[in-house]
Amino acid sequence: MSAGATAAPSTPVRSQREVFGDTLAALAAERPEVLVLDGDLANSTRADIVAERRPGQFLEMGIAEQNLFGVAAGLATMGFTPFISTFACFAVARALDQVRVTIAQPHLGVKIAAGYSGILTGSTGKTHQMVDDLAIMRAMPGMTVFAPADDTEAEALLRVAADVSGPVYVRLARDAVRRVFEPPYAVPFGAPVVLREAPGTVLVSTGTQTARTLEAAEALAALGVEVGLVHVPVLKPLDVASLLAALRGRRLVVTVEEHTVMGGLGSAVAEILAEHGGPRLRRIGLEDTYGESGPNDALLERYGLSPARIVDRVRTWVEETDR
Protein backbone atom coordinates (compact mmCIF):
# COMPACT_ATOMS: atom_id res chain seq x y z
CA MET A 1 0.00 0.00 0.00
CA SER A 2 1.29 3.48 -0.81
CA ALA A 3 0.64 6.73 0.99
CA GLY A 4 2.10 10.17 0.46
CA ALA A 5 3.73 12.14 3.24
CA THR A 6 2.22 15.52 3.93
CA ALA A 7 4.13 18.76 3.43
CA ALA A 8 1.88 21.08 5.44
CA PRO A 9 -0.52 19.72 8.07
CA SER A 10 -4.11 20.92 7.70
CA THR A 11 -4.58 20.82 11.49
CA PRO A 12 -2.12 21.43 14.35
CA VAL A 13 0.18 18.49 15.05
CA ARG A 14 -0.44 16.90 18.46
CA SER A 15 1.72 14.69 20.61
CA GLN A 16 0.72 11.04 20.76
CA ARG A 17 -0.03 11.38 24.47
CA GLU A 18 -2.54 14.15 23.69
CA VAL A 19 -4.02 11.93 21.01
CA PHE A 20 -4.32 9.12 23.55
CA GLY A 21 -6.35 11.29 25.94
CA ASP A 22 -8.58 12.76 23.25
CA THR A 23 -9.19 9.45 21.47
CA LEU A 24 -9.93 7.46 24.63
CA ALA A 25 -12.31 10.15 25.86
CA ALA A 26 -14.13 9.93 22.53
CA LEU A 27 -14.14 6.12 22.59
CA ALA A 28 -15.49 6.13 26.13
CA ALA A 29 -18.32 8.42 25.05
CA GLU A 30 -19.15 6.11 22.17
CA ARG A 31 -18.72 2.81 24.01
CA PRO A 32 -19.69 2.36 27.67
CA GLU A 33 -17.54 -0.77 27.97
CA VAL A 34 -14.33 1.23 27.38
CA LEU A 35 -12.45 2.02 30.60
CA VAL A 36 -9.12 3.74 31.23
CA LEU A 37 -6.98 2.51 34.14
CA ASP A 38 -4.16 4.85 35.14
CA GLY A 39 -1.00 4.19 37.13
CA ASP A 40 -0.78 7.65 38.77
CA LEU A 41 0.62 9.22 35.60
CA ALA A 42 -2.52 10.78 34.14
CA ASN A 43 -1.07 14.27 33.74
CA SER A 44 1.91 12.80 31.86
CA THR A 45 0.14 10.24 29.67
CA ARG A 46 -2.80 12.67 29.31
CA ALA A 47 -5.26 10.15 30.64
CA ASP A 48 -6.37 13.16 32.68
CA ILE A 49 -8.37 14.18 29.61
CA VAL A 50 -10.46 11.05 30.09
CA ALA A 51 -10.75 11.72 33.83
CA GLU A 52 -12.11 15.18 33.08
CA ARG A 53 -14.49 14.28 30.25
CA ARG A 54 -15.58 10.75 31.27
CA PRO A 55 -14.92 10.44 35.02
CA GLY A 56 -17.18 7.40 35.34
CA GLN A 57 -14.95 5.46 32.94
CA PHE A 58 -11.63 6.45 34.49
CA LEU A 59 -10.03 4.42 37.29
CA GLU A 60 -7.02 5.75 39.20
CA MET A 61 -5.04 2.73 40.36
CA GLY A 62 -2.05 4.48 41.94
CA ILE A 63 1.60 3.49 41.80
CA ALA A 64 0.88 -0.24 41.82
CA GLU A 65 1.37 -1.48 38.29
CA GLN A 66 1.09 -5.20 38.97
CA ASN A 67 -2.27 -4.64 40.62
CA LEU A 68 -3.31 -2.31 37.80
CA PHE A 69 -2.75 -5.03 35.21
CA GLY A 70 -4.48 -7.64 37.34
CA VAL A 71 -7.57 -5.44 37.72
CA ALA A 72 -7.57 -4.77 33.97
CA ALA A 73 -7.51 -8.52 33.33
CA GLY A 74 -10.44 -9.05 35.66
CA LEU A 75 -12.43 -6.29 33.98
CA ALA A 76 -11.75 -7.86 30.58
CA THR A 77 -13.32 -11.12 31.77
CA MET A 78 -16.47 -9.13 32.65
CA GLY A 79 -16.97 -7.75 29.15
CA PHE A 80 -15.16 -4.43 29.55
CA THR A 81 -12.49 -3.09 27.19
CA PRO A 82 -9.79 -1.78 29.53
CA PHE A 83 -7.05 0.54 28.29
CA ILE A 84 -4.02 0.77 30.57
CA SER A 85 -2.32 4.14 30.87
CA THR A 86 1.28 4.11 32.08
CA PHE A 87 4.87 4.47 30.90
CA ALA A 88 6.38 1.77 28.66
CA CYS A 89 9.07 0.99 31.24
CA PHE A 90 6.44 0.17 33.87
CA ALA A 91 4.10 -1.68 31.52
CA VAL A 92 6.79 -3.95 30.10
CA ALA A 93 9.40 -4.30 32.85
CA ARG A 94 7.63 -3.81 36.17
CA ALA A 95 4.40 -5.62 35.30
CA LEU A 96 5.76 -8.20 32.86
CA ASP A 97 4.68 -11.23 34.89
CA GLN A 98 1.12 -9.92 35.12
CA VAL A 99 1.09 -9.16 31.38
CA ARG A 100 2.28 -12.68 30.59
CA VAL A 101 0.25 -14.73 33.08
CA THR A 102 -2.98 -12.79 33.63
CA ILE A 103 -3.40 -11.15 30.22
CA ALA A 104 -1.47 -12.82 27.39
CA GLN A 105 -1.85 -16.48 28.39
CA PRO A 106 -5.66 -16.29 28.76
CA HIS A 107 -5.72 -13.99 25.70
CA LEU A 108 -7.73 -11.24 27.37
CA GLY A 109 -8.68 -8.05 25.57
CA VAL A 110 -6.55 -5.63 27.60
CA LYS A 111 -5.09 -2.74 25.62
CA ILE A 112 -1.72 -1.51 26.89
CA ALA A 113 -1.11 2.12 25.93
CA ALA A 114 2.61 2.45 26.68
CA GLY A 115 3.57 6.11 26.83
CA TYR A 116 7.04 7.64 27.06
CA SER A 117 8.54 4.82 24.98
CA GLY A 118 12.05 4.77 23.53
CA ILE A 119 14.88 7.07 24.59
CA LEU A 120 13.18 10.46 24.14
CA THR A 121 11.55 10.66 27.54
CA GLY A 122 12.57 14.17 28.53
CA SER A 123 13.46 14.74 32.15
CA THR A 124 12.40 11.27 33.32
CA GLY A 125 15.94 10.05 32.65
CA LYS A 126 17.62 6.81 31.66
CA THR A 127 15.80 4.63 34.21
CA HIS A 128 12.54 5.41 32.43
CA GLN A 129 13.81 4.77 28.91
CA MET A 130 12.48 1.57 27.34
CA VAL A 131 14.46 0.37 24.35
CA ASP A 132 13.58 -3.34 24.30
CA ASP A 133 9.80 -3.27 24.65
CA LEU A 134 9.09 -4.23 21.04
CA ALA A 135 11.37 -7.26 21.37
CA ILE A 136 9.63 -8.42 24.55
CA MET A 137 6.09 -7.83 23.34
CA ARG A 138 6.70 -9.16 19.83
CA ALA A 139 7.92 -12.44 21.34
CA MET A 140 4.88 -12.83 23.58
CA PRO A 141 2.38 -15.31 22.05
CA GLY A 142 -0.92 -13.74 21.05
CA MET A 143 0.18 -10.14 21.61
CA THR A 144 -0.65 -7.59 18.90
CA VAL A 145 1.98 -4.84 18.62
CA PHE A 146 1.37 -1.34 17.21
CA ALA A 147 3.89 1.51 16.75
CA PRO A 148 2.22 4.56 15.16
CA ALA A 149 4.28 7.11 13.26
CA ASP A 150 2.47 10.30 14.23
CA ASP A 151 -0.66 11.79 15.76
CA THR A 152 -2.93 10.75 12.89
CA GLU A 153 -1.86 7.13 12.95
CA ALA A 154 -1.93 6.99 16.76
CA GLU A 155 -5.61 7.87 16.74
CA ALA A 156 -6.35 5.32 14.04
CA LEU A 157 -4.47 2.51 15.79
CA LEU A 158 -5.99 3.23 19.20
CA ARG A 159 -9.42 2.84 17.62
CA VAL A 160 -8.33 -0.37 15.90
CA ALA A 161 -6.96 -1.67 19.22
CA ALA A 162 -10.39 -1.39 20.82
CA ASP A 163 -11.72 -3.93 18.32
CA VAL A 164 -8.80 -6.37 18.26
CA SER A 165 -9.51 -9.71 19.89
CA GLY A 166 -6.98 -10.28 22.64
CA PRO A 167 -4.23 -8.12 24.12
CA VAL A 168 -2.69 -5.18 22.29
CA TYR A 169 0.49 -3.23 22.98
CA VAL A 170 0.49 0.32 21.57
CA ARG A 171 3.86 2.09 21.65
CA LEU A 172 3.36 5.83 22.16
CA ALA A 173 5.93 8.64 22.28
CA ARG A 174 5.97 11.62 24.63
CA ASP A 175 6.64 14.50 22.23
CA ALA A 176 5.08 15.54 18.96
CA VAL A 177 6.86 14.66 15.73
CA ARG A 178 6.41 15.71 12.13
CA ARG A 179 3.09 14.52 10.75
CA VAL A 180 3.48 11.72 8.25
CA PHE A 181 -0.18 11.02 7.51
CA GLU A 182 -2.85 13.64 7.00
CA PRO A 183 -6.34 12.79 8.37
CA PRO A 184 -8.63 11.13 7.57
CA TYR A 185 -6.46 8.02 7.54
CA ALA A 186 -7.42 4.36 7.57
CA VAL A 187 -4.51 2.33 8.92
CA PRO A 188 -3.76 -0.79 6.85
CA PHE A 189 -3.90 -3.45 9.55
CA GLY A 190 -0.76 -5.54 9.38
CA ALA A 191 0.45 -4.14 6.07
CA PRO A 192 3.49 -1.87 5.66
CA VAL A 193 2.98 1.57 4.13
CA VAL A 194 5.19 2.69 1.25
CA LEU A 195 6.02 6.38 1.76
CA ARG A 196 8.67 6.77 -0.94
CA GLU A 197 9.34 4.68 -4.03
CA ALA A 198 12.89 4.26 -5.33
CA PRO A 199 14.96 1.43 -6.81
CA GLY A 200 18.13 0.13 -5.25
CA THR A 201 17.89 0.98 -1.56
CA VAL A 202 14.89 1.06 0.75
CA LEU A 203 14.67 2.23 4.36
CA VAL A 204 12.24 0.47 6.70
CA SER A 205 11.16 2.22 9.88
CA THR A 206 8.49 2.10 12.58
CA GLY A 207 6.93 4.32 15.22
CA THR A 208 7.88 7.98 15.49
CA GLN A 209 11.33 7.18 14.12
CA THR A 210 9.63 7.06 10.72
CA ALA A 211 9.27 10.86 10.75
CA ARG A 212 13.02 11.28 11.24
CA THR A 213 13.75 8.59 8.67
CA LEU A 214 11.52 10.38 6.18
CA GLU A 215 13.54 13.56 6.75
CA ALA A 216 16.71 11.57 6.13
CA ALA A 217 15.31 10.13 2.89
CA GLU A 218 14.49 13.64 1.68
CA ALA A 219 17.98 14.84 2.58
CA LEU A 220 19.51 11.91 0.72
CA ALA A 221 17.44 12.75 -2.35
CA ALA A 222 18.76 16.33 -2.22
CA LEU A 223 22.27 14.82 -2.32
CA GLY A 224 21.37 12.72 -5.36
CA VAL A 225 20.84 9.47 -3.46
CA GLU A 226 17.31 8.23 -4.02
CA VAL A 227 16.03 5.75 -1.46
CA GLY A 228 12.63 4.22 -0.82
CA LEU A 229 10.91 4.32 2.56
CA VAL A 230 8.53 1.77 4.06
CA HIS A 231 6.74 2.41 7.36
CA VAL A 232 5.67 -0.56 9.52
CA PRO A 233 2.89 0.48 11.93
CA VAL A 234 1.95 -3.08 12.94
CA LEU A 235 4.93 -5.18 13.98
CA LYS A 236 2.72 -8.10 14.93
CA PRO A 237 0.93 -9.58 13.11
CA LEU A 238 3.20 -8.47 10.28
CA ASP A 239 1.99 -8.92 6.72
CA VAL A 240 4.98 -10.85 5.40
CA ALA A 241 3.78 -11.01 1.81
CA SER A 242 3.22 -7.24 1.62
CA LEU A 243 6.59 -6.46 3.17
CA LEU A 244 8.38 -8.82 0.80
CA ALA A 245 6.60 -7.15 -2.12
CA ALA A 246 7.78 -3.74 -0.90
CA LEU A 247 11.38 -4.99 -0.66
CA ARG A 248 11.44 -7.04 -3.85
CA GLY A 249 14.08 -6.06 -6.39
CA ARG A 250 16.09 -3.87 -4.01
CA ARG A 251 19.83 -4.26 -3.50
CA LEU A 252 19.94 -2.93 0.07
CA VAL A 253 17.47 -2.74 2.95
CA VAL A 254 18.17 -0.54 5.99
CA THR A 255 15.94 -0.81 9.07
CA VAL A 256 15.77 2.19 11.41
CA GLU A 257 14.21 2.08 14.87
CA GLU A 258 14.35 3.92 18.19
CA HIS A 259 14.88 0.59 19.89
CA THR A 260 17.61 -1.98 20.32
CA VAL A 261 18.59 -3.65 17.05
CA MET A 262 17.91 -7.00 18.70
CA GLY A 263 14.38 -8.35 18.68
CA GLY A 264 12.51 -5.40 17.21
CA LEU A 265 11.87 -4.24 13.64
CA GLY A 266 15.37 -5.07 12.41
CA SER A 267 15.10 -8.60 13.72
CA ALA A 268 11.64 -9.05 12.23
CA VAL A 269 12.90 -8.01 8.79
CA ALA A 270 16.02 -10.17 9.17
CA GLU A 271 13.87 -13.20 10.00
CA ILE A 272 11.70 -12.64 6.95
CA LEU A 273 14.64 -12.17 4.58
CA ALA A 274 16.42 -15.23 6.04
CA GLU A 275 13.37 -17.40 5.42
CA HIS A 276 12.31 -16.02 2.04
CA GLY A 277 15.48 -14.55 0.56
CA GLY A 278 16.10 -10.98 -0.44
CA PRO A 279 18.59 -8.13 -0.50
CA ARG A 280 21.39 -7.32 1.91
CA LEU A 281 20.23 -5.95 5.26
CA ARG A 282 21.72 -3.27 7.52
CA ARG A 283 20.19 -2.22 10.85
CA ILE A 284 20.18 1.15 12.63
CA GLY A 285 19.19 1.28 16.29
CA LEU A 286 20.70 1.04 19.75
CA GLU A 287 23.61 -1.39 19.75
CA ASP A 288 23.29 -3.58 22.87
CA THR A 289 23.26 -0.59 25.22
CA TYR A 290 20.92 1.30 27.50
CA GLY A 291 20.22 4.94 26.87
CA GLU A 292 21.48 7.94 28.83
CA SER A 293 19.85 11.01 30.30
CA GLY A 294 19.98 14.02 28.01
CA PRO A 295 18.13 16.31 25.59
CA ASN A 296 16.33 14.60 22.72
CA ASP A 297 18.53 15.95 19.93
CA ALA A 298 21.71 14.96 21.75
CA LEU A 299 20.41 11.44 22.31
CA LEU A 300 19.39 11.04 18.69
CA GLU A 301 22.87 12.10 17.59
CA ARG A 302 24.62 9.83 20.08
CA TYR A 303 22.73 6.72 19.03
CA GLY A 304 22.76 7.39 15.29
CA LEU A 305 19.04 8.09 14.98
CA SER A 306 19.06 11.74 13.91
CA PRO A 307 18.32 12.42 10.23
CA ALA A 308 21.91 13.58 9.71
CA ARG A 309 23.41 10.43 11.22
CA ILE A 310 21.06 8.24 9.17
CA VAL A 311 22.12 10.07 6.02
CA ASP A 312 25.81 9.50 6.74
CA ARG A 313 25.43 5.79 7.36
CA VAL A 314 23.10 5.14 4.45
CA ARG A 315 25.34 7.01 2.00
CA THR A 316 28.29 4.88 3.08
CA TRP A 317 26.34 1.64 2.75
CA VAL A 318 24.91 2.62 -0.66
CA GLU A 319 28.41 3.37 -1.93
CA GLU A 320 29.65 0.00 -0.64
CA THR A 321 26.72 -1.82 -2.25
CA ASP A 322 27.21 -0.06 -5.60
CA ARG A 323 30.91 -0.93 -5.87
Image (spheres, helix red, strand yellow):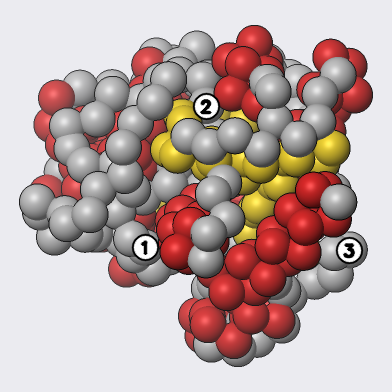
Q: Residue at x 81, y 31 (%)?
A: 279
Q: Position of residue 108 (x, y in %)?
A: 57, 19
Q: Residue at x 75, y 21 (%)?
A: 141
Q: Position of residue 312 (x, y in %)?
A: 68, 71
Query: Cβ–Cβ below 8 Å for labels 3 and 2?
Result: no
Q: Bin the neighbour count of mark 3 within 10 Å (Cα to Cα): few under 14, some 14-19, many 20 and up.
A: few
Q: Position of residue 207 (x, y in %)?
A: 51, 48
Decide: is 168 above or below 305. above
Q: Secondary structure at mark 1?
A: loop
Q: Amino acid at mark 2?
A: Pro
Q: Which mark is residue 254?
A: none
Decide: is 235 above or below 305. above
**Residue 118 seen from this side:** yes
Q: Quadrant of the N terminus?
A: top left
Q: CA distance from mark 2 to mark 1?
A: 20 Å
Q: Bin the neighbour count of mark 1 within 10 Å (Cα to Cα): few under 14, some 14-19, many 20 and up.
A: some
Residue placed under numbered mark 2 in the picture: 192
Q: Amino acid at mark 1?
A: Val
Decide: is 67 above or below 32. below
**Residue 237 seen from this side:** no
Q: CA distance from mark 3 to mark 2?
A: 26 Å
Residue placed under numbered mark 3 in the picture: 288
Between 265 and 107, the one lying in front of the other is 265
Q: Is residue 230 left or right of residue 151?
A: right
Q: CA distance from mark 3 to mark 1?
A: 26 Å
Between 298 and 281, the one lying in front of the other is 281
Q: Residue at x 28, y 24 (%)?
A: 186
Query: Cβ–Cβ below 8 Å for labels 2 and 1?
Result: no
Q: Amino acid at mark 3?
A: Asp
Q: Quadrant of residue 155?
A: top left
Q: Which mark is residue 177?
A: 1
